[in-house]
Image (spheres, rainbow, N blue to C red):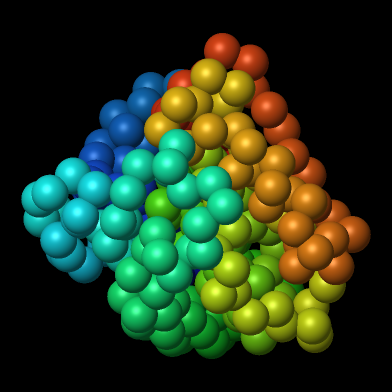
Amino acid sequence: TPLVGFNKTFFFLHGLGNCANTYVIKVFFNTSFALPENVRLVFFQSPTYYCTEYNMTFPIWFNVFMPFQFMKGIPQNHCFNMTQAASTKTRLLKAILREHKYLDKVAYKGKGKIYLSGVSMGGAIALMVGLEYKRSIENIFVFSGYLLKIAKINNMDKKKKITLFHGNKDYVIPLDYAIDSYNNKSLLQFPNVDLTVIKGLDHNLTGEEWTF
């Protein structure tokens, strides 16, 4: 992606057990997709932690203690390692702020614009970070994700758009999680929140996400 001459940065966070390189390959070897010259893509890579749910260690933003199907009615701090999630959030907030300041210096058409996106657990982190980020964000895209209750809402920027995408055939993170997130009082504070339910889609991306 370009280092100069751009005015938009699009951050993407991968899901549980995956890695940034997987999505780099998907994007840059997708012949139907051409990256706009004014856009820079940044793929964050998660730390490696032990995952209780799968009884193994792999790239993961925070530990998950049990399958999502069993989490209903259980406080999130009994489902996820919130200390790890908070540590990830702090690291990403600093990285995005650095990028935003750099973007402002090199943007050739007005101020730089930031977009956040993530899939599954990466979507949960992207949403949490986007809600807390103190500067303007154009849009937060969450694919098959959910709202982490430890998110602290930044009341200074209610104009940011939040778009949730979820398949109705997702049995890893059921659609109910997206609906509950959409109806959560934290997101109801924002006038530009949308939930798009994609019929027939499981816990995956459609391949059309990169046509932003």
Along the line of sight, which residue is nearer the eye, 121 or 108?
Answer: 121
Image vertical order of residue 112 relative to residue 143, above or below: below
The residue sitting at the left extreme is 56
Q: Is residue 103 something that shows in the picture?
A: no
The picture quadrant where one finds residue 153 is: bottom right
Give the total of numbered labels.
0
Which residue is farthest front? 73
The x, y position of residue 44, in whole percent, is 33, 62
Residue at 59% in and 68% down: 149
Judge whether 35 appears above or below 40 on screen: above
Q: Nearer the viewer, residue 180 or 132?
A: 180
The foreground one among 126 and 146 is: 146
Q: Position of residue 107 (x, y in %)?
A: 59, 74
Q: Residue at x 89, y 59 (%)?
A: 191
Q: Tell me: residue 160, above or below residue 152.
A: above
150 and 92: which one is in front? 150
Is residue 149 found left or right of 47 in the rendered image? Answer: right
- In the image: residue 127, left or right of residue 170: right
Rendered residue at 60%/22% (across/down) = 168
* Residue 195 seen by the camera: yes
Quarter of the rendering containing residue 98: bottom left
Q: Is residue 82 above or below residue 56?
A: below
Quadrant the N terminus occupies:
bottom left
Please provide percent x and percent y for residue 13: 40, 55
Corner quadrant of residue 7: bottom right
- Residue 55 appears at what percent x and percent y? 12, 49
Q: Residue at x 21, y 67 (%)?
A: 47
- View extreme (top): residue: 200
Quarter of the figure with the C terminus: top right
